C-alpha cells in the first residue's frame, strides 16, 4: 500500500514527438533517481518513487504534469509571443539559423547533473539558448562567440529583464520619434538615436531590434524597416517583461550569465574551472555564418571579407577549407578539455555536413579526438533535423565524460 501511495503519473509535453526526445526524457528521470515504468501510450509514465519531487517539478524539461499538477516548465513555456512552442520568453529574439531546441538543452543540463550554482560553458554560444536555460535553472553560464551579433543577442536575451522600466521609457520615446523621422533617412535616424543611448544594456536591446529589422528588410521578406523595428522592439519588450515577471512569480534564483566576444581556440580560464560544457560547433564548412548574418554584421560596421578569417570553417576553399576546420576544432576541443573538471560531462551536438556532395565525417572525428583526450563516450544519440536538409539530415548528441 505504501508503494502505491507514492506512485505518481508523469505526463510528457505534447510536442515530444521524436525518439531522441523520449530517450532524453528517460535519461532525465534517471538523473533525478526516479524509478519508473512506461504506460502503453508512451506519453505517460508511472513514477514508483521520486526522491525529490519539488526539485524534479522545478527542473524537468520533458514532463508537463505530475499527476494533475503542472510543472514549472509548463508555466515558463506559456509566456510566448510566437507561434512556436520552443520560442518562449526571450528565446525567439533574432532569426539565428540552426539554433538550439531550448527543451533539449534544459533536459541535457539535467542529464549532465548540472546543479544550481554550478558553472557551465558554451564556447559557441550562438543565439544564447544555453545561457537562457542555464540562467532559468540557477546555473551560472559563461558563453563565448567570435561573432558580435551572437555577443549582442545573447546579452540582450539574458540581461534585459533587469531594465524593464528604463526600456519602457526609451521605447515610448522611439515610438514618438518614428512619427517624426523622414522615411528616406529612417535607418540612419534610428541608428543614430540608438548610439546616443548612454546605458549599454538599453542600447544593446534596441541595437538587436535594429539588427532584426535589417534582417527582415534584406532577406526575402522585404519588410519595411521602420515597421519591423517597432514591431520587434515591442515584442522584445513584452518577452523581457514576461521574463522579469516569471522570475518573481515562480521565485526563481537566476544563474549568473557572462557573455564574451572571444575565440574558443584561446580560452582564458583556469584549469578545471567548469562543471560542464555543452555546445554545438559551427557547421561553417557547409553554412557560411558570416554571409548568413551579413545584413546585421554590415549594420554593425564590419567588413565581411576582413572578419571571415576569424571564423572557424570559413577560411580556405575545397579540401584546404576542411583541413583548416578540422585543425581548428581539434584546438578548440583541447582548450575545452583544459577548463573542464575531471569526472564531469561535455556534450557536443554535431552532424556530418556535406560539401559538394561529399560527407564530412565530423561526428567520427569528434569522437576520435575526445577518446584521445581520455574521455568516455557515455551516449551517442541520433537527432533528426528538419528544415536544414541542404546541409545535413541528422545530428548526433555526443555525451562525453572526462575520466
Image (cartoon, helix red, strand yellow):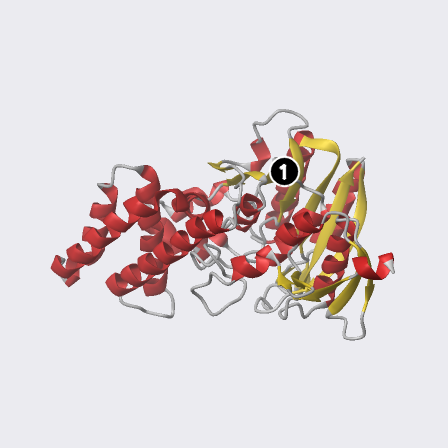
Residue at the top extreme of this rendering: 270
Q: Position of residue 307 (x, y in %)?
A: 43, 43
Residue 19 in percent (x, y) is at 74, 67
Depth check: 28 or 340 in front? 28
Of residue 60 and residue 265, the one placed in the foreground of this image is 60
In the picture, measured across the screen, residue 113 lies left or right of residue 243, that is right
- For image coordinates 58% across by 55% down, the residue present is 72
Q: Residue at x 63, y 38 (%)?
A: 332
Instruction: Report whether 84 appears left or right of 27.
Output: left
The count of marks equals 1
Q: Nearer the viewer, residue 319 or 11?
A: 11
What residue do we see at 52% from left, 50% from top? Answer: 250
Indicate whether 33 appears above or below 23.
above
Quarter of the image with the C terminus in it: top right
Q: Secondary structure at mark 1?
A: helix
Which residue is depicted at the point 69% across and 66% down?
11
- Image coordinates for residue 194, horizontal then vertical, percent: 25, 46
Measured as percent of width and height from the top left, residue 158 is found at: 46, 45
Q: Quadrant of residue 134?
A: top right
**Relative horizontal placement of residue 50, taking residue 134 as reference (left or right):** right
Q: Quickly name the residue at label 1.
A: 332
Amino acid at each position: 500500500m505504501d508503494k502505491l501511495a507514492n506512485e505518481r503519473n508523469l505526463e510528457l509535453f505534447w510536442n515530444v514527438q521524436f525518439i531522441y526526445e523520449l530517450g532524453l526524457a528517460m535519461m532525465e528521470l534517471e538523473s533525478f533517481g526516479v524509478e519508473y515504468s512506461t504506460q502503453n501510450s508512451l506519453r505517460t509514465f508511472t513514477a514508483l518513487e521520486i526522491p525529490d519531487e519539488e526539485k524534479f517539478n522545478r527542473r524537468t524539461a520533458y514532463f508537463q504534469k505530475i499527476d494533475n499538477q503542472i510543472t514549472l516548465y509548463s508555466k515558463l513555456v506559456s509566456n510566448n509571443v510566437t507561434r512556436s512552442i520552443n520560442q518562449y520568453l526571450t528565446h525567439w529574439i533574432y532569426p539565428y539559423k540552426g539554433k538550439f531546441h531550448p527543451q533539449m538543452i534544459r533536459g541535457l543540463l539535467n542529464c549532465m547533473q548540472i546543479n544550481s550554482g554550478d558553472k557551465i560553458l558554451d564556447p559557441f554560444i550562438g543565439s544564447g539558448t544555453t545561457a537562457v536555460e542555464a540562467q532559468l535553472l540557477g546555473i551560472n553560464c559563461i558563453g563565448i562567440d567570435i561573432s558580435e551579433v551572437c555577443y549582442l543577442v545573447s546579452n540582450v536575451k539574458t540581461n534585459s529583464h533587469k531594465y524593464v522600466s528604463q526600456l519602457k521609457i526609451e521605447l515610448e520615446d522611439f515610438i514618438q520619434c518614428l512619427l517624426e523621422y523622414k522615411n528616406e533617412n529612417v535607418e540612419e535616424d534610428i541608428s543614430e538615436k540608438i548610439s546616443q543611448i548612454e546605458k549599454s544594456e538599453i542600447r544593446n536591446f534596441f541595437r538587436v531590434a535594429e539588427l532584426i529589422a535589417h534582417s527582415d528588410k534584406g532577406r526575402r521578406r522585404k519588410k519595411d524597416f521602420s515597421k519591423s523595428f517597432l514591431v520587434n522592439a515591442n515584442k522584445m519588450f513584452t518577452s523581457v517583461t514576461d521574463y522579469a515577471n516569471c522570475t518573481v512569480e515562480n521565485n526563481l534564483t537566476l544563474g549568473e550569465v557572462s557573455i564574451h566576444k572571444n575565440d574558443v581556440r584561446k580560452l582564458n580560464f583556469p584549469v578545471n574551472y567548469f562543471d560542464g560544457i555543452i555546445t554545438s560547433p559551427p557547421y561553417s564548412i557547409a553554412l557560411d555564418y558570416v554571409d548568413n548574418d551579413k545584413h546585421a554584421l554590415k549594420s554593425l560596421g564590419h567588413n565581411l571579407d576582413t572578419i571571415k578569417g576569424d571564423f572557424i570553417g570559413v577560411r580556405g576553399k575545397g579540401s584546404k577549407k576542411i583541413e583548416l576546420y578540422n585543425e581548428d576544432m581539434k584546438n578548440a576541443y583541447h582548450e575545452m578539455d583544459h577548463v573542464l573538471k575531471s569526472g564531469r560531462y561535455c556534450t557536443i551536438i554535431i552532424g556530418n555536413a556535406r560539401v559538394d556532395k561529399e560527407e564530412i565525417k565530423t561526428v567520427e572525428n569528434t569522437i576520435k579526438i575526445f577518446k584521445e583526450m581520455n574521455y568516455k563516450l557515455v551516449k551517442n544519440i541520433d537527432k533528426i533535423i528538419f528544415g536544414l536538409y541542404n546541409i545535413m539530415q541528422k545530428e548526433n548528441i555526443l555525451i562525453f565524460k572526462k575520466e
